[in-house]
Amino acid sequence: MKKITFSLIGIFTLITSLSFSQTYSTGVIELINDEDYLYTAQIEVTTSLVTLTLSGPDNKYLGLGFDAMTMSAGRDVVIWLNDGEFKLTDRYFGYPGQPDGQVATGIIPTLDTEQDWTIVSNTTTGGQRNVVATRLPDTGNPNDYVFSASASSIDLVWSFEASLGYVLAWHGENVGITRESFTLSAPTFTKADFTIYPNPGRTHLNINLPEYSTDARVEVLDILGKQIYTSALSSLNNRVSVSKWHSGVYLVRVTQENQVVTKRFIKQ
């Protein structure tokens, strides 16, 4: 009897902590906005997820370094490029003589062994590429910056190439630094918002959308960030079988019209 009581208290505590998860955001940061280029970034952090949104020229690589004001050795950096496929590469600033060598007067950031960012959406509009990607706040990789879901600040260094073609090349004058603050983000309604029930659940999960669009999709990740389920959402009310899932906490992510909302589901 004591075991059951303790277990129920533990589950209640977990549900309570998940229910009151808060989002801290930098808001949209204008890294550069002139007559030639617009490059923006936004970082949103909860206790379980980091969401990075990049918007920049659709014909160049886009780079963003975390906790850095220069190409400091060991600092975390992500670079959007196309080396046969479009992807957001997880890297870190190295040092002269590193295996990747040099590009012009700059040094190519070294590719991480573990690629921790998951692309949620990748679209282009009017010459601008918009990329949304997510990862865990603390991946366990010593080369990755650890994001804190609290009021704080972060130093960022950014660049994109001077030439065309998504090649890791000299950025010319397309480079800069900034210091930004994470503040508590007020909840806002988005087209991708949804409700889930029952939660916790044993056999099935209902996903209800406030309005429907043809591009609505759901993706479910386990607590380690591994995708276990993905599907289009064909109606306002959708039902997913979870009977074969292991007991535990899952992240349910709905994408709709380039907007992303993530909620937590507990499988009993």
Image (spheres, helix red, strand yellow):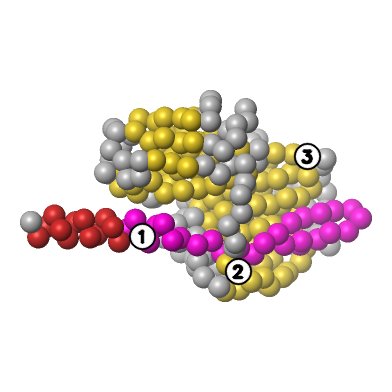
Q: Type of residue at label 2? A: Phe
Marks 2 and 1, how far apart at CA = 24 Å
Provide residue 264's location: percent of width, then percent of height: 42, 49
- Identify the residue at horizontal 60%, vertical 61% (top origin): 186
Residues at badges 1 and 3 in contact (C-beta under 8 Å)?
A: no
In the current view of this chain or complex, which residue is farthest to the front? Answer: 210
Which mark is in front, 1 or 3? 1
Furthest-left residue in view?
A: 1
| 15 in magenta | yes
Q: Earlier in the sequence, mark 3 or mark 2?
A: 3
* Amino acid at the residue labelled 3: Thr
Left or right: 147 with respect to 180?
Answer: left
For residue 214, what is the image quadrant? Answer: top right
Q: Which residue is mark 2?
A: 182
Q: Are marks 2 and 1 in contact (CB under 8 Å)?
A: no
**26 drawn magenta:** yes
The residue range painted magenta reads 14-40
Q: Residues within 10 Å of mark 2 (few under 14, many from 20)?
A: many
Q: Which residue is mark 3?
A: 125
Q: Earlier in the sequence, mark 1 or mark 3?
A: 1
- Foreground pick, 213 / 152: 213
Q: Residue at x 35, y 30 (%)?
A: 241
SS class of the residue under badge 2?
Answer: strand
Q: Type of residue at label 1? A: Thr
Q: Circle 1 is placed at which residue position? A: 16
Q: Residue 69 in the image: state x and y as whole percent.
A: 68, 72
The answer to whether 186 appears left or right of 239 in the picture is: right
| Mark 1 closeness class: few <14, some 14–19, many ≥20 residues within 10 Å | few
